[in-house]
Amino acid sequence: MSTLTSTDRALHDFAAQVGAEDPIAVEGNRTRWHLGGPLDELARLVEAPTGIVDYQPSEMVVTVRAGTTVAELHETLAAAGQTSALPDRGGTVGGAVAVGENRLDRLGRGSARDAVLQVRYVSAEGEIVTGGGPVVKNVSGFNLPKLIVGSLGTLGLIAEVVLRTNPLPPVQRWIRAERVDPRDIRDALLRPGAVLWDGTSSWALVEGHEVDVDAEVDKLATLADIADVDGPPELPPHRWFLSPQGAAHVDTMTDGAFIASIGVGTVWAEEPPQPAEPDPVAAQIAERTKRLFDPSGRLNPGRRAGA
Amino acid sequence: MDLKINADDLNACVQCGLCLPHCPTYRVTGDEALSPRGRIHLMREVQDNDAPVTTEVVDAFDTCVQCRGCEPACPSGVPYGRLIESTRAVLADTGAVSTRRQRLAFWALSRPRTLRLGSTLLAVAARLRLVPERLGVPTDLPFMRGQRHTSGDDVYLFTGCVMDAWQRDVHDAGQRVLEAAGVGVTPTGDLAPCCGALHTHAGLGDPARQRAEATITALSNDDRPILVDSAGCGAAMKEYGHLLGTPEAAAFSARVYDIHEWLATRLDDLPTTAKLDLCVAVQDPCHQRHVQRVHDATRAVLAPYVHKIIELDDDGLCCGAGGAFSVLHPQLATDIRDRKVDAIERVSPDIVASANPGCSLHLAAGGVEVMHPMQLINQALHQRT
Amino acid sequence: MPLFRSTREPIDPLVADLTAALDADRVRADGAQRSLAAHDASVFDGGIAGPVCFPETTEEVQAIMRIAEQHGSAVVPRGAGTGLAGGAIPLGRPVVVSTGRMNKVLSVDTDNRIAWVQPGVINLDLSKKLRPKGFHFAPDPSSQQVCTLGGNVANNSGGPHCLAYGVTDAHVVSLEVVLPDGQVAVLGGAEDETPGLDLRGAFVGSEGTLGIATKIGVRITPNAPAVRTLLLSFATVRDAAQTVSDIIAAGVVPAALEVMDQRMTVAVENYVAAGYPTDAAAVLLAEVEGLDGGVEIDAARIEELGRANSATDVRLAGSEKERAALWKGRKTAFGAVAQIAPDYYLHDTVVPRARLADILEQIYEITDRHEVTVMNVFHAGDGNLHPLLVFDAREQGTLERVHAAGAEILRASLAAGGVLSGEHGIGVEKQAYMDELFSPADLDHQNRLRQAFDPACRANPGKVLPMGHSCADIQALREMPTGVWG
């Protein structure tokens, strides 16, 4: 019998706490508390269970409960030379999955939504629901993990996830480059961890085997004035979601400070982003999804994914 | 209906579908019925489950170009050529497919004088633009043909029917290349006027077998190699063993070589010379690549004489000529040719080399400049320095 | 017997409406066409197909959806028909929507590294088109020379090189989708993160049950400048499996790690003559991609780990031609088995890598007990097994033994902590096993997702979710046509 139907005390306790009646929300470390609109004051707050349940480095998967901090998870993974695609902003694993933001080094680590192989959440009816599977490749049934990542807890309260891990590169070097089009840096590097741009300077995270990193940095030296730096620049507070090409032209869209992720499209800016115009039909599907998963609207009331 | 297909041959197909992209008619229509897997499914339904032979079923079988591009693509080794030949022969016999026009046209093929006379008349008509364009008859057909001569008795050069009337300069070039390698050549000429490939293609089993038997009889006074510069003829003659099922036919087939195949093992005998300053795209005739599978030889023989050989990126997909196919199914043939012309334009060669008369004519009608590899080599060998 | 008799039904009002919306050439209701649409590459007998449509535009797909809705017909999309789980076979006389004519690459945007394609574009055709620009589409299913990108989206297809690059959902950025009610939704976009629910992600792998994708934006991946392909031979399957685990544990992420057992290797070598060793119990095909220096290091590490696990031979592909031949062998493996028996049943399960060797031993034991021949070829790096049961269906009782053995293999994989399918999907093949992997609440939530897109259950009904859930109960309509063009 599959492990998916096994019982787990901490998850059942969490489900019991969530119940099936009243408005409810999960409180993590509140690092992204404002997203999706203000939470209804009537909502009862609960905390997700914590702890790393299972970790097999040779499988490159880790099972972790949602209340665990990303920092704790990454510490455990780092001991085996690995990490995950979740960003560490001082929050919890469940929070990071519910928000679904990618790391700064998204080019190197992949996206958060691709990292979630299996999710267990407590439904509006108070039942534990499992979607996906605990292995790196799986097309068994509908892709509930994708739906849950970035749903801000509006479809179910995340209790536990199985994440894909990836090996930390043997060498990582942050390089700052001047007098160069950041897109040329992106195109020159085969697999950069990140390429950033503030309108003047560029930064590149060059990673891999030492010999490859040296060769790639030598290549950059032919394109630009470069220097090794300790890390990426400070990021302004607001996130804009642009296409890669849009991010490379973000200097024409704002007068404020920004850091653009070249080749990805995400921009961190001083100014808040223009509200996105969602596809109207997609919005209808999203509304229907919410009604079907949470008919009484008790999960994270007041919040809406994408608001 | 019994399509007279061997049950094991029919069962060899596991429906994996890997043949689909290698089928020209599937490629241009996206229609499963016009694919090898689809046609085999219909053969099974007709032969095993007695499904009725409707117009759509006939159409599926009738539109197969018989390029046999599906055969090398098939990991299960389904002998598709045998399946479709048998199916078409049965349909032709039962009258499901009308073969009257083809029978009439093919009648002339083994009557060389009639063919040459007709061909000259056609050449005149084509110059006068009296021939419908869709038939793809070249406007520069020769009025006159040079004399054939025998230069020795090392090999036969099979000259065939339509090609001898329309493209005798290719035979002449092939013969001069062979002679340059010190080989004495006997052109077969009217001795063996037609190999029967077009008949086999059309499902005309009896006339095909008659042509095969006549050809074998005519060329079996000795055991000289028989070289063929038309890929379609070469493929048919190599399959006489299967067609007739006799040891004599099998022994004859073993003597048949594609001219490039034979020369490729004797490259050292060919003189070296200055290369033609041409980038040549090789268009592999299906019956050379998929049936005889000797297309690498063309490159080996041609390479020393041209600046560069360029490969098309379409995995040897058929050009749509297919014997009489371009005449019987002009729209499909044109759509298929358009794909080939696109592939040629993607690599922008100076010229295209093709070792089959049908392909050359069909591509030329699509505005592509085509020469036979032997013509290119001959030109290189005899260029003025 | 009458020749030239067509079973076209000119008075069928559904066909008349479809013909008015497309044209007569592209709506085919004849028996032969419908018989063909009743099958894909799986062993499952088709039901009865309704008319087969060949739309060329999004608007035409919308029209088909609306007409089908008016006539109360279901709709099943069909790409190249290479699916192995019966996902494209018609149940309940649906309108079949072939994507065969929607085969244009609309644009290649190298700035954003996205190619916009219609769903009928063949996977390998896209990569070929991208090659001169220095890119490719990373997911490379074994059927990539024929399968379509629409099919890849429907099945969230994998492939040998998905070990390093991820399966299809990691490479699809945007989908234009025609819903079963005829409306068009655009899911996702060129932005890396799009606010709101990830409906794009939910659509990928939904096996045609949520609608039909009519325009797909896929990520294109730069071609790596250096590639090393190694062929390692082993005296036992266990040694090969252990090597795979050790490579991953060492932090090496090869582009591909593929294993074939001896029976498979012999069949493949017979077809491609690529130089596969036919005397080894198992071969491991390992490929690393990247920059020159790194691939040397990784290749050396793989060789070292192989030798530590008693590899009997380690060979490095010396040329691109040799490499291509090895891959051709691997990718045509399934078809090559017809040399051994006329029928095959290809399974697809995933287990944790560490359990590979155990499960393989169980598979040999199970198939021996059921007197079925098994050949193994699998994506070892992902733990994705493909036991291939070969048989002759004409022999009395064989099919029953094959199904019994298959069911045991599936249950053994689940017991080892695996899942039902790594890349072929559920289709009709594994519906009955869904409730062995998922609880009723799990399946109920999957059903809710389906209903959010398709409340009336008209998109490819009868697939994925087991009987008892809505959209699955159309068994009554599964009749078998024999000997007539339905």
Image: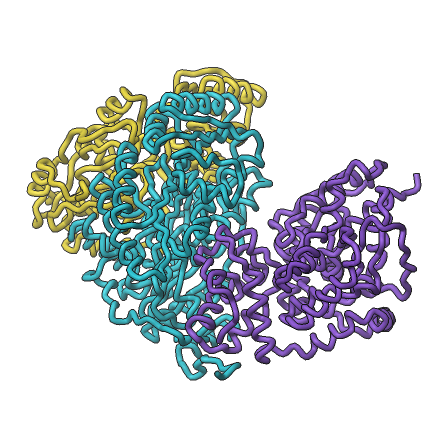
Give the camera-side residue of C209 and B160. B160
Indicate whether C470 appears above or below B291: below
Give the number of callouts: 0
Which chain did the image draw in purple?
B
Chain rendered cyan: C
In the rendered image of this protein, does residue B308 appear above or below residue B27?
Answer: above
Q: Nearer the viewer, residue B6 or C57?
A: B6
Q: From the image, state the color of chain A.
A: yellow
- Image: A104 above or below B367: above
- Measured as percent of width and height from the top left, residue A138 is found at 31, 44
Relative image position of residue C441 (x, y in whole percent): 16, 51
The one of C391 and A54 positioned closer to us in this rendering? C391
Q: Tell me if residue A86 can be seen.
A: no
Q: Residue at x 82, y 59 (%)?
A: B188
Q: Judge by depth and name the residue closer to the eye, C136 or C402.
A: C402
- At x 37%, y 34%, the residue is A110
A90 relative position to B281: left or right: left
Q: Position of residue B201 (x, y in %)?
A: 65, 66
Q: Is residue B249 left or right of residue C34?
A: right
Q: Is residue B183 visible?
A: yes
Percent x, y of residue C130: 55, 43
Q: Residue at x 49, y 50 (%)?
A: B75
A60 over B18 or under it: above or below: above
**Residue B340, quarter of the rendered image:** bottom right
Quarter-of-image position of residue C364:
top left
